[in-house]
Image (cartoon, helix red, strand yellow):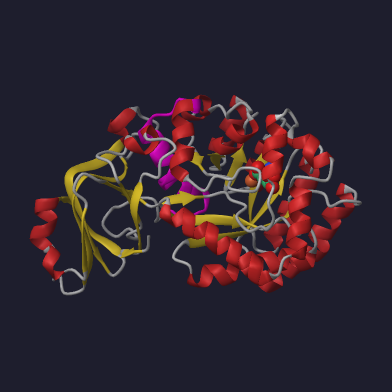
Amino acid sequence: MSADLQTVVHDAAEVVVGKREGAWPGEGSELLETYADAAVAVVDGEVAAVGPTEDVLREYPAENADSAYDATGQTVVPGFVDPHTHAAFAGDRSDEFEAKLKGKTYQDILADGGGILRTVRAVREASEADLASNLREHLDAMLAYGSTTVEVKSGYGLDTETELKLLSAVETVAEDHAVDVVPTFMGAHAVPEGMDADAYVDAVVDEQLPAVDDQGVAEYCDVFCEEGVFSVEQSRRVLEAGKEAGLTPKVHAEELAHVGGTKLAAEVGATSADHLLHATREDVDALVDADVVPVVLPGTAFGLGADYADAETMLDAGAPVAVATDFNPNCHSRSMAFAQALCCVEMRMTPAQALVAATEHAALAVDRPAKGRLDAGSPADMAIVDAPSHVHVPYRFGEDVVAATFKDGARVA
Ligand code: NIG
Ligand code: FE
């Protein structure tokens, strides 16, 4: 029975399976299905059994496993899913961090040709190999911090050649990296210097999207629907053309101002609407009605010193709130544990809610519904937290709380 037993993680202080059916948004630990003194057995990359250590080891003895991990005093949670990153880039914008501390705004920096536009210049100059090597380094760090699935956007090319170069670098890294990578095309990330937004939308629709479709790497099409960037109507054109090229919509919505990106996300059938710092109750209801996952990115608000998204309203509406790092040169955080700490401290979510947001809801935000839980039959993607319960993930903010990461049952960090 246990001949092909790959891995047994045993004697964990706690194993978190996922949220209890019907319990969201529930308070505290009643939200979660957990076991104390527990183990996980893995066969062929999938969870074969989860439960009290004694029960699991009776059926799957540790000595029969290719590898056994003693998790005494530790907690096993589903591998984090990071559903929104801009992790494929080149260059360094740490000086902008200092400028922001002195009072410059994100928009000031962009208007001066900095911000996204500066990263675009660096990416246009970088080789594909350099872009791949930078991305690999970031994914290595994310894996060590417990993320096993990561969405990665293009969007620092803003021309056909460079957008394809970015997506090709993403594809190369995805082929052999332990992290499951979800690729997103985001040609409509900013208006390139010297161009008008309508003309650039024409270029995205008529040139970039057909080329991206031919190259066949991307799964999603995202757009920065924002005051001074792309209007709702321009964003709609991009997302509809993306759908024709087989790409599912995602939207950067209501980040710096309220312009209507949330309703657009609901209208075009997006998988997620992200940021939402200025979303209203009506916007949130529209997302819920259309089955669009709201993704909050509290690291961005932290880095900008801005107000946070209104998670309370989202929870009150029963929305399946997800959280992501938004890792990018403006928000240099690769840690989903830190994002969860911000969910708790700044958005008043409970540690259990933040964990669900970082695992199974985040998996919904990239349409990977099999991930983010540890039921029998789930992919055995696990983060082992070096502490006795899931509450310690946000409680120990600023520390690397992940002792080991398993992907499809194999230890990868
Ligand atoms: O999600 N808002 C647009 N895009 C990114 C920032 C990218 C950048 O500044 O390089 C975001 O925050
Ligand atoms: Fe973003």
User: In which quadrant of the rendered image does the C terminus lie?
Assistant: bottom left
Query: Where does the image place residue 113, in percent across and percent down from the top left?
Result: 83, 45
Residue, x 29% and y 45% (percent of image)? 386
Q: Residue 318 magenta-drawn?
A: no
Residue 123 seen in render: yes
Query: Where does the image place residue 337, in percent across and percent down from the top left?
Result: 43, 42
Query: Where does the image place residue 130, in percent across and percent down from the top left?
Result: 65, 67
Q: Total label count?
A: 0
* Residue sitting nearer the eye, 397 or 222: 397
Q: Is residue 222 left or right of residue 21?
A: right
Question: Does residue 265 lie above or below 193 as drawn?
Answer: above
Residue, x 60% and y 62% (percent of image)? 134
Residue, x 73% and y 28% (percent of image)? 103
* Residue sitting nearer the eye, 303 or 223: 303
* Residue sitting nearer the eye, 358 or 177: 177
User: In which quadrant of the rendered image does the N terminus lie?
Assistant: bottom left
Residue 316 seen in render: no
Q: Is residue 366 left or right of residue 165?
A: left
Q: Is residue 126 left or right of residue 411?
A: right
Mainly helix, strand or loop, the magenta region? helix
Query: Where does the image place residue 376, in percent across and percent down from the top left?
Result: 26, 57
Residue, x 77% and y 63% (percent of image)? 124
Magenta region: which residues? 346-369
Q: Residue 309 occupies which quadrant of the picture?
A: top right
Q: Residue 361 magenta-drawn?
A: yes
